[in-house]
Amino acid sequence: MFRSLCLALLILAGANPAFAGCTLSIFKESPAVPDARSATLDEMKQAVVSIQQYIHSAEKVLETCDHINTFTHNIYVGRLKALADDINRESDIFSTLATSDSLASS
């Protein structure tokens, strides 16, 4: 009996949990969304690229995290959607300001 228990504990200690590849730490800090009224074109471009990469990486993490419940999963998806909405809104504002500035200088 003791031998079986030791063997079971040894197997359990060496086993990887199903969620070993799941690290939700990516959600602790997301890229900043610049203010369209004060950002330069390069800052906006860089922000869009870094946010796209972040969202792509975070989606991959969520695919590996099948141990989290649906509610938690949806919270993280909501955060990603909010981030995408924020950068899209600021990009639209930036484009509008850039267009109006170019028209004003013509």
Image: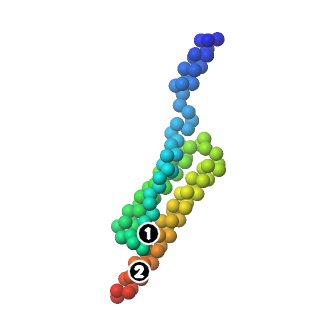
Report x, y in % for residue 98. Answer: 40, 78
Q: Secondary structure at mark 2?
A: helix
- The residue at 43%/71% (across/down) is 36
Horizontal side of 102 relative to 69 (left or right) equals left
Label 2 sits on residue: 99
Of the numbered discs in the image, which one, if any, rests on residue 22?
Answer: none
Above or below residue 41? Residue 60 is above
Q: Amino acid at mark 1?
A: Asp
Within 10 Å of disc 2 (Cα), the crowding (few <14, some 14-19, many 20+) is few
Above or below residue 11? Residue 94 is below
Measure the C-alpha gap from mark 1 to mark 2: 17 Å
Q: Amino acid at mark 2?
A: Thr
- The residue at 44%/69% (across/down) is 35
Locate residue 78: give its quadrant. bottom right
Between disc 1 and disc 2, whose residue precedes? 1
The mark lying in front, picked from 1 and 2, is: 1
Label 1 sits on residue: 35
Q: Secondary structure at mark 1?
A: loop
| Pointers 1 and 2 in contact (C-beta within 8 Å) | no
Report x, y in % for residue 83. Answer: 51, 61
Above or below residue 59? Residue 12 is above
Locate residue 66: give its quadrant. top right
